[in-house]
Image: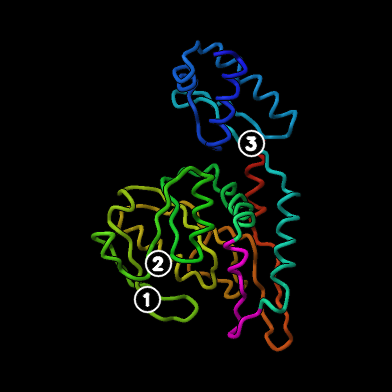
Amino acid sequence: MKRAERIAAITRVLCETPGKIHNINEFSEMLNCARSSVSEDIDRIRSAFEKLNMGKIRTISGAGGGIQYIPYVDVGYYEEFVKQLCMIFSQKDRIISGNFIYTSDVIYNPIMVDKIAQILAYSFIDVFADYVVTVETKGIPIAFAVARLLKLPLAVIRQENKVTEGPVVSINYVSGSTRNIKTMYLPKKAIKANSSVIIIDDFMKAGGTAKGIVDMMKEFESKVVGIGVFIATKEPQQKLVSQYVSVLQLNGIDEKQGLIDIQSGDWIKNFKKIEDFQ
C-alpha cells in the first residue's frame, strides 16, 4: 500500500477507537509493511492531529505499550453546549405535574445525545472497563451512545423479566427517592464474571437505582469503575453512591412560579484528566 493509503487506514482505526492502546505490530500485520514504515506514518498523523487540534497520539512504553489516541477536548465547546442545555431545561413549559422535567425530546435527539455521550465518554476514557450498563428505558439512548464511543458492549437491566432473554439474575432494591422496593433483572449471559463496568443513566436523585446496579454487579462478581448520569439533583446531597459524573445538576423546581433552577454538573472536573494527556 502507498503511504497515503496506510495513513488513511491508521487514522480511521485510531479515530474509531479513542483511548484504546494499539500495538505497532497490529498495524504492521494489517497493512503488511515494516514496523519502521508504520512508525513513520504515525509520526505524520501525530503532527497533523496536533496542528489541526484534533487530538494527541500518546506513545506508551513497556511490554503492553503501543500508541493511544486521545481526542482533543475543547472544554469551551462543551461548556457552551451545557449552557444551551440549561437554557432548554429552564423553560417553564418543561415542568410536568409532580415537579418533574420533560426531557424525552432531548434524550431521543441523536445530535444532542451524541454530545451528551461525548461528555460522559471522555470522562471515562482513561478508565478500563468491559461493559457499559444502564436501566431501561430513557437511559438507553445515552448509554448506547457512550458505549459506541468507548467501543464497549451495552448491558440493559430490565424492570420486568422477559422470558426471551433466558435465565436472569434478579435483586430487590430500595428507590432512594420514593423508598419503594423495586426489582431489577439482568440475563446471566449479559455480563461475564470478573468484569469491570461503567454505569450510565439519564437521571439520579438519591442514587437508589445506581446503588441497585452496584449490588447487581456483585452478583456477577463484577465491579463498578465509573458512574455517569445526564441529570443529578442537588438534594439530597448524600447520595447512596459516590464518585459519579453528572452533565447537569437540578437544584430545584417551583411548579407554582414556573421556575426551574438547573446548572452545569461536575463533568468538567473529569475533563481536567483528559487535558493532562494533551
Residue 107: % across, % down: 58, 63
Quadrant where the N terminus is found in the figure: top right
The secondary structure type at the circle numbered 2 is helix
**In this picture, which residue range is highlighted in magenta?**
95-108
Residue 114: % across, % down: 60, 52
Circle 1 residue:
182
Dot 2 amino acid type: Gly
Query: Which residue in the rendered view is the most extreme toward the bottom?
Result: 256
Circle 3 residue:
277
Dot 3 amino acid type: Phe
Circle 2 residue:
212
- CB atoms of marks 3 and 2 within 8 Å: no
- The residue under the point 57% across, 75% down is 236
- CB atoms of marks 2 and 1 within 8 Å: yes
- The residue under the point 65% across, 71% down is 250
The secondary structure type at the circle numbered 1 is strand
Q: Earlier in the sequence, mark 3 or mark 1?
A: 1
Q: Earlier in the sequence, mark 3 or mark 2?
A: 2
**Quadrant of the image occupied by residue 160:** bottom left
As drawn, is 259 to the left or to the right of 135? right
